[in-house]
Image: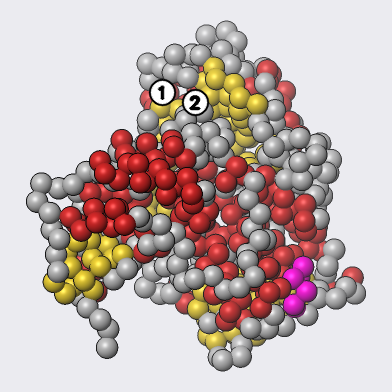
Amino acid sequence: MHAIIVGAGMGGLFAALALRESGRFDKIDIYEQTRVPSTAGAGLNIAPNGALLCNWLGVDLDGGDIKGPHGAIDGGRAAILDATREIMSDGSVSHRPIKYNRADDTSAGFHHMHRLDLLMCLYKRVFESGPETGVTCPIQVHMNKRLNSLRQTATTAIAGFEDGSTATGDVLVGADGINSKVLELQWPDTPPRRWTEVTVYRGLIKREDVAALRKADGSPLDNNPIDSFSMDVRKNPYAWALTYWVRGGELLNVWQAYYEPDSAEFEADEGDWFHVDNSELQANMGRAFADDVRKDDIVALSGAVENPTKWGLYDRDAFEHWQDGRICLLGDAAHPMLPTMGQGASQAFEDAAALSSCFKLHGEDVYAALMHYERVRHYRATRFQFMSKFLFKHLEPEDSLERRQILKALNERDYPIFNHDERAGDDDSWIYLFDAREIGDKLPLKKLGPWDFRSRTAAMETRQEIAANLWRPEISLNGERTVSLAEVEQHNTFENCWIIIDNAVYDISEWKDHHPGGPFVARMYAGKDATAEFGDYHTKRAELHMRHFRVGYLEKSI
């Protein structure tokens, strides 16, 4: 078979390597719209669940010359950090060693990297399978190919490009990011991306400049990153300042964000990022941390960033489908997420690994392979997509007591490793020790609930204990009328939210603020079918409780 991949970023390159590994393809072509390989931004994190897959494909995250030229096609030059530090508002420091960094751990720990270094080590691995090498199933990268048309037949997928050329293959993978052209062409009614009202500054500081940092009054920093090979975070409800070492400790990545609801720079969607002066960083971050003992350190870091860039953070609601016939989405094109969970690249790698396993299982049955891929990946990836929003407190609805009880009983951590809150326990193995290659041996059921990724027994027992005390409205609906899908779709906002569960229609506008999982469900499924969130694990007692919110039943389609 022949695979076409649109987008030669991290997800697209990794997908090519993974599909080649499946043994089902004779040729893989990647089409990239830029003229030369490039990537914006500064640092990123490859978590153990992503590093495991890099090891599988021979992608060298650790090798390379840490003092070599910028943009060299080399090993990834990662920094393997010792710990995370959260520097609190009272000046105290919470220090935690990073797990999963043991030498005998095949997941190989957390890799903190320069984005361009990751892209180049992926290119290095791809070029080792280029057509000129004579390998079976060569991978060819085509630059300056901007997609402008897309169609498919019963046997092929066809991509058209602005230069008039076309590409025809058995399957087409859209790995072209949050502004995906594949998404736009294949699913034209998808709502546009949404401005989160969060502005981000990114940049790097050389190690020697970090060592020389001083506050404005000339005194040393209270917590200089040079003194700790760690990821450091300082945050308040409306601003973050995050630093960590990349390129083996030669560069410090600086990521600073603040909530700016009155900003007009990004609302018009004129561009993703642009260069700014350090004085702007210092002024805005100084205001964001005004009257805070950590402010002077943050302002000093802001002033030392080389060539800082300014970004507007955007998100999207979860897409209902990632595949249609012979076309599918992968990575940010399928589930664009905010950077707060540190899972963007790792989730793209997981997509690619699962896609490879699906083709290994289903062979030339492209339709079955892509359906299987969507069903095993959709819930896990979209869960990270929504959790990443809630680490910004202005985007997160207040937790209900019931939700906290259930999450704590499950002891399942739903915050990233560098956030030391224990909102939902401390077991983060579901995040970091997951192997996306394991997809089962048959096509899964149409929809999977979240408990299929957790301890089902613990979840059921916990729900039975709590269900008797769940909140109910003063007046129960307990409706029996017939409801059209069009009527459900009209109630599609967070404040006016109807959802469908197993063909019954529920009004969770009030319920979401009291019920476990409610805010998440309201944001993900307003006006849609929420069976994927609820249908697979509700106890009979919980189902009886849900009658209080039932509007009626969805009319049967003819």
Q: Disc 1 vs disc 2: Cβ atoms closer than 8 Å?
A: yes
Residue appearing at x 15%, y 60% in the figure: 478
Instruction: Answer with left or right where residue 6 lies relative to residue 410.
Output: right
* Residue type indicated by callout 2: Arg
Depth check: give the residue in front, 69 or 356: 356
Residue pointed to by mark 2: 234
Q: Picture coordinates of residue 480 (x, y %)? A: 14, 69
Residue 477 vertical placement versus 29 (above, below): above
Residue appearing at x 54%, y 17% in the figure: 93
Depth check: give the residue in front, 497 or 34: 497
Q: By what rule are the colours in the image chosen?
A: secondary structure
Q: Picture coordinates of residue 346 (x, y %)? A: 62, 51
Q: Can residue 495 be seen here?
A: no
Residue 406 vertical placement versus 243 (above, below): below
Residue pointed to by mark 1: 289
Q: Name the image quarter holding residue 96.
A: top right
Q: Name the image quarter holding residue 471.
A: top left
Q: Picture coordinates of residue 200 (x, y %)? A: 47, 40
Residue appearing at x 76%, y 35% in the figure: 102
Residue farthest along the bottom direction in this orientation: 154
